[in-house]
Image (cartoon, rainbow, N blue to C red):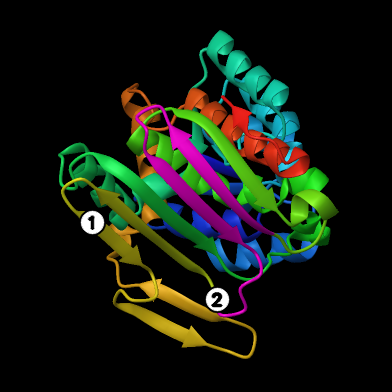
Amino acid sequence: MKVGVVGTGGMGNAHARQYRKMPGVELGYRERNHVRADSFKDTFGATYFESIDALLDWADVIDICLPTDVHPEYAHKAIAAGKPLFLEKPIARTIVEAEEIVEAAAKAGVTLMIGHVVRFFPEFALARKMVLEGAVGKPAAIRTRRGGGAPKGSLGWFMDHERSGGVLLDLAIHDFDWLQWTFGKVKFLYSRSLGAQTGQGPDYALTTLTFESGAVAHVEATWMDPAGFRTMFDIAGSEGLLEFDSRKTPALKTVTTESTVYEPSLAPDEDPYYLELKSFLDAVENGTPVPITGEDGLVALRLSLAALESARTGQVITL
């Protein structure tokens, strides 16, 4: 299968590493930055295309790893070309843009999957399974934490919150998606965020979600932790407690002057990104539903944007 990657920043490289593990996958790409384009070719032996149209003509499927605010432009190009589309989260910067992408894909009969990769992380997948099987009884209180240092991105786009949405849209959306997938619909939420007030730079946010079930979740997301990236969760219920902390599980720890990185010891075909992208290609090849739909992406986006509205206004937002 010919996979066309659009954008070769951090996420484009992360995806390419996984595609290279898959037999029968040919890799092509489009990148405007010539330095990154050359590096991508040298690293992955992929075929470079001078234009997005040339890549669309060649590829069987398209994987978009671009800044959030330009997702609509390239998503609509792929859909118009009839190419199955993997679109990194968030699906778009606004609800209107996201709805237009989902509607266009449905009208064209194009497969669309959104990259909410946390569903494929073994700890999160197992915790959800255990919750649904009643391991903690009736869930009552959930706490999640995700983040590390501030990402930069091409031309610093992450730090421009008009483009990225800040930590609530780019980072907390991972947990919002997993929480609603695991615990059901959110009734209302309240959020506070540094970036929602400044509109730029590093960000920290704390959001409280109340579910229709009565359970409450506290979601912490940060781009202001110099100790390196970390994820954790606690799930307390009537019958027990589940806990996970990425800094306490067996991992390879790499410390440099710039960062501390923890790399879980997973087999190549157990990597969450591998499982995510393989599920997309399998769905395309077999004509089966993708595990994370455009509608799923819309739900997560609505939660993030509601949290942003709450953080800006100081009001509780009912969903």
Q: In this view, does 279 lie above or below 36?
A: above
- The front one of 93 and 290 is 93
Q: In this view, does 254 lie above or below 86?
A: below
On residue 228, which mark appears? 2
Tag count in the figure?
Answer: 2
Label 1, secondary structure: give it: strand
Circle 1 is placed at which residue position? 241
Disc 2: CA contacts within 10 A as few (<14), some (14-19) or many (>=20): some
Kindly identify the residue that appears in the image at 52 percent across and 70 percent down: 229
- The front one of 132 and 296 is 132
Indicate yes or no whether the magenta region holds residue 206.
yes
Q: In which quarter of the image is residue 134?
A: top left
Kindly identify the residue that appears in the image at 38 percent across and 58 percent down: 233
Q: Please indicate, yes or no, whether residue 38 appears anywhere in the rendered image.
A: yes
Indicate yes or no whether the magenta region holds residue 13.
no
What type is the residue that disc 1 sits on? Leu
Query: Which portion, as a residue range, is magenta?
Result: 204-228
In the shown orientation, is residue 9 left or right of residue 108?
A: right
Q: Is residue 144 above or below residue 265?
A: above
Q: Are marks 1 and 2 in contact (CB under 8 Å)?
A: no
In the shown orientation, is residue 235 left or right of residue 219?
A: left
Quarter of the figure with the C terminus: top right
Task: Provide residue 128's location: percent of width, then percent of height.
Answer: 27, 44
Tell me which numbered mark, 1 or 2, is placed earlier along the sequence: 2
Q: Please indicate, yes or no, whether residue 1 appears anywhere in the rendered image.
A: no
